[in-house]
Amino acid sequence: MGDWRRAAVAAAMLCGAAGSAAAQEPTAVLGHEIAVRACASCHAVEPGAANDIAPPFFEIANDPERTRAFLIGWLMNPHPPMPDLSLTNAEIAALVAYLDSLKAR
Ligand code: HEC
């Protein structure tokens, strides 16, 4: 576990559900922390934001074709141009929970 991951776990435990308005599940809060550190250089991580580098998370979360199973599979084995970030199963579960929390309801 890298230092930022330890920090993310600690932050998620300290902040609990208060971390972000969009991510209220503790797992989703952790996923948000990981996304800010590991994904935000390419993806717009926050709901409503966008950039030209990669599809925004809000769009990914609200595309019915990108199912939970697809997202898990993608994160276990991403294709270029996205790099393989060697995520652990726990990190993938947290990221998918964060993406889930971005679904427009
Ligand atoms: C170095 C830039 C970069 C980083 C860092 C990055 N991505 Fe990506 N990601 C991309 C690009 C570019 C695509 C578009 C790939 C395509 O459509 O062919 C993509 C696509 C995706 C997709 C959707 C694939 C699809 O076709 O529907 C998901 C989900 C995703 N990224 C999640 C993540 C997550 C979660 C992280 C952080 C753990 C992350 N990415 C980090 C560049 C990046």
Image (cartoon, rainbow, N blue to C red):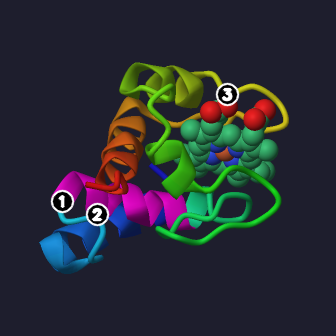
Residue 29's disc number: 2
At horizontal 32% and vertical 46% (from top left) the residue drawn is: 100
Q: Secondary structure at mark 1?
A: helix
> Hey, which quadrant is residue 19 in on the image?
bottom left
Residue 103's disc number: none
The vertical placement of 7 against 95, above or below, is below
Please, what is the three-letter code of the amino acid marked with disc 1?
Pro
3 and 69: which is toward the camera: 69
Give the tally of numbered discs. Answer: 3
Q: Secondary structure at mark 3?
A: loop
The vertical placement of 90 against 42, above or below, is above
Magenta stretch contains residue 34: yes
The vertical placement of 47 against 35, above or below, is below
Please, what is the three-letter code of the amino acid marked with disc 2?
Val
Crowd tier of the residue under label 3, counting other residues whose Cα lies within 10 Å: few below 14, some 14–19, many 20 or above = some
Please, what is the three-letter code of the amino acid marked with disc 3?
Pro
Left or right: where 54 falls relative to 105: right
Magenta stretch contains residue 16: no
Q: Are marks 2 and 1 in contact (CB under 8 Å)?
A: yes
Q: Give the residue pinned by disc 1.
A: 26
Q: Position of residue 65 (x, y in %)?
A: 50, 25
Q: Position of residue 88 (x, y in %)?
A: 45, 34
The residue range painted magenta reads 25-36
Q: Give the residue pinned by disc 3.
A: 78
In what quadrant of the picture does the C terminus appear?
bottom left
At horizontal 54% and vertical 64% (from top left) the residue drawn is: 45
Visible in this render: residue 83?
A: no
76 and 20: which is toward the camera: 20
Ligand 1 contact, mark 3 (Cβ < 8 Å): yes
